[in-house]
Amino acid sequence: RLVDELLESPHFGERWGRHWLDLVRYAESRGHEFDNDSPNAYQYRDYLIRAFNADVPYDQLVREHISGDLLPEPRLNPEQGFNESILGTGFWFLGEWVHSPVDIRKDEADRFDNMIDVMSKTFLGVTVSCARCHDHKFDAISTADYYSLSGFLQSSDFREVRFESFEHNRRIAEQLAELDQKYQQQVNNVLKPDQYVDAALPALSAEVAATVVLNYETLPENHYIQDGFIFGQRPRLAGEAWLNTSNAEGIQFAPGSAALSDSFWNGLESLSEKVGQDRGELAKLPRSGRTLRTPTFDLTDGNVNCRVQGVGHVVACVDSHRLIAGPLHKETIVPISVNEKWVHLNLSRYIGHRLHLEFTPAVNEQLTLSLVTQGATPEIRSLLDQRAASIAQRVAEFETQAKQAHEQELNTIAAEWAVERSALQSKVMKRSRLAMAMLDGTGEDDRILIRGNSSKPGDIEPRHFLTAITGDQPMEIAQGSGRLELAEQINHPANPLTSRVIVNRLWHYLMGRGIVPTTDDFGVLGQRPTHPELLDHLATRFTENGHSLKKMIRTIVLSSTYQMSSFPDQAALVNDPKNMLWHHRPPKRLEGEAIRDALLSLSANLKTSQFGEPVPIHLTAFMDGRGRPGESGPLDGAGRRTIYTAVRRNFLSPFMVTFDTPTPFSTMGRRNVSNVPAQALILMNDPFVVAETRAWANRALEITSTSEARIDWLYQTAFARQPTEQQKTVAITFITNQAKSRNIPENSLALWADFAHALINTKEFIYLR
């Protein structure tokens, strides 16, 4: 009954979510020089807690982490209906970022290396990143395997997703597309515009076509990429009917093929956590859910020009670099003004790099993009303008004839179209919180970097999973990045690693040591499993039970092994001094988070509220340097559980670091468990510890009336047991002698605070036996 009660507790997800955060190197800042924010990282933390509480099947969690943005049927929050699955992809972007790197391609390679390292260790328990520079020296992992996985990241992108409104507005966007198509068909039925539609568009000369990177007349459907829905489901083609509601002109015909933001979506509001550190130039632009992305292309000429109309910004995202917080890469962000026909980007610095462009209209403004060129001279741009003018003139002539011949029918259609559009527009969910997530980009394969050197690209390596598991067969990718297919390969029953890695982690967290002691390395350099048949049994049972984490935890904690005494049999120690065969349960030290939360619980200051923005870290006088947060959080962390305290890479809590909370750099499935003087010193001298033990002592004075009763109560609350007779005698003697020597009454708060503080400093308080 106790086990079931704990598994159903809303705090189960907080306890087990903290373990998982170690695996994905969770932090809310980027580290490096100025410790810039990782915006809205806490949404991933909250997603994780909800997922553990809901006992989401582990294979589904894997799916959501690898490809949650691509799932055809995402998991929805049962209360608020928002997309939970897409939040899982935020784990990819929890790593360190460098602002304004000089070698931007090397910076991307380093970021990808960390992402591959975290993914492979977390889900597969193998060190794939060892193969960045050469084939793995011990495991069956090749450099080709490494760069095949890098291709999945090259084909994906970062965004801050409007996750609360994403699914709702996606349905609205689908309905809007159907609505527009219905009325466009009605217009076509009235006009029968065969003469114009069948007429061939003026062809581009070879010289002009060589400079065109993007042309919406010929763009493949699966290359039309955007974050959000405001640019519609496809480009608007030349001559296509559309309803102009901005200036009440009714039905018009597109003067050329282009991507056009729709005023239907005006008024979107993105809710983000308050800004801490400077988040760079991109954070100032209203990009979330409002950005059009071009396919990725190789830059061969730094003279890039975009044929546009409207107001907004264009951003050149070079080698997926986004933390533009200094002057070095500000030339990649260019404003678009209302009078510009062409917007110019000078990208000469990045010739030879891969990049894509992102277009964002200004708030409540429209933005149109028709062409992107590189290396186009003014003469070529003039030819493109002439061609566009020729097409627009033909459309205008057709439009004039059509409206003269069918004015009444078109006005009737326009009126009905406007009414239906307005009714649908009223259903748009305009406010939404943001979270880090992935966006599928252009499906691409990465190049092998010779010796891991980003300046020495080699052969292209197609995307595939580890060949040691799936063989040499190429992966069949339907479209895009292929992360959907990658997730299924990781989850495939023929993959021997995924289920064994996670049940081994559960065993490790519960028992203090994994069946495979090296929880993040099942390779040759890792330690062999002490009980391989047990590991197989648990993995099989885990699969049969629907990949339920809670059922597996229940199985382990109700076993006789988990319930063993921590006091070993001396005869067993002779044959198994390291306890590799589990003849007893070794004492286990609490993690720093559990120690801190226990102090708050004793003092009755622990607040059980869940989720939300992190509580700012309490800054001591010694926590100084560049990127120091502007405000210091409260000493007690507002009384909230430690999982809700901000994790800033350059300003980690001294209390947590002292008790071995890992630095968030890569996967840490097995924390160090040290026993150093700093731990005793911090329990003796830390102002937080002193304040909480004083509050705990004050509770004892309020609840009980005699010294003996207070001692019993303090032992019961601290150690879940009554004191022995010897301990009670020593305690009473201490209280009596201290009261006399200090000339204070025996019910003095100062006296009992000292006694409570002494109990906190015993090993029994931080160790479980």
Image (cartoon, rainbow, N blue to C red):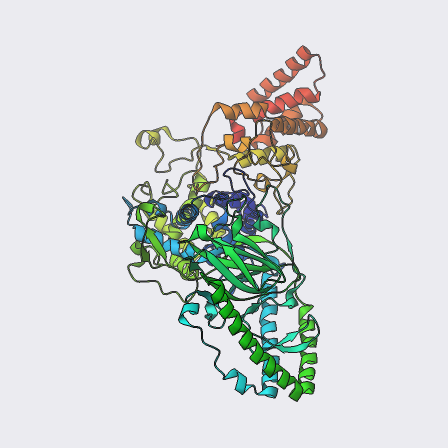
Can residue 78 be seen in the rendering of this structure?
Answer: no
Relative vertical location of residue 687 with respect to residue 379 in this rendering, above or below: above
Q: Nearer the viewer, residue 183 or 423?
A: 183
Is residue 186 or residue 556 the one in the foreground?
A: 186
**Is residue 329 shown above or below 201?**
above
Q: Position of residue 281 (x, y in %)?
A: 57, 48
Residue 527 position by quadrant: top left
Along the viewing direction, whichever of 149 and 506 lies nearer the viewer:
149
Counting from the top left corner in percent of width and height, residue 108 is at 43, 48
- Residue 469, image quadrant: bottom left
Q: Quadrant of residue 176?
A: bottom right
262 and 298: which is toward the camera: 298
Q: How many marks?
A: 0
Identify the residue at horizontal 37%, vertical 43% (top origin): 515
> Where 294 sits versus 317, above or below?
below
Left or right position of 175 against 493: right
Q: For this view, does 739 lie left or right of residue 20?
A: right
The relative height of residue 748 versus residue 741 in the rendered view (above or below) is below
**Residue for point 39% across, 43% down:** 519
Q: Residue at x 61, y 84 (%)?
A: 186
User: Percent x, y for residue 619?
Assistant: 60, 32
Residue 25 seen anywhere in this rendered image of the structure? yes
- Outermost top residue: 741
Q: Residue 378 in the image: x percent, y percent?
A: 49, 63
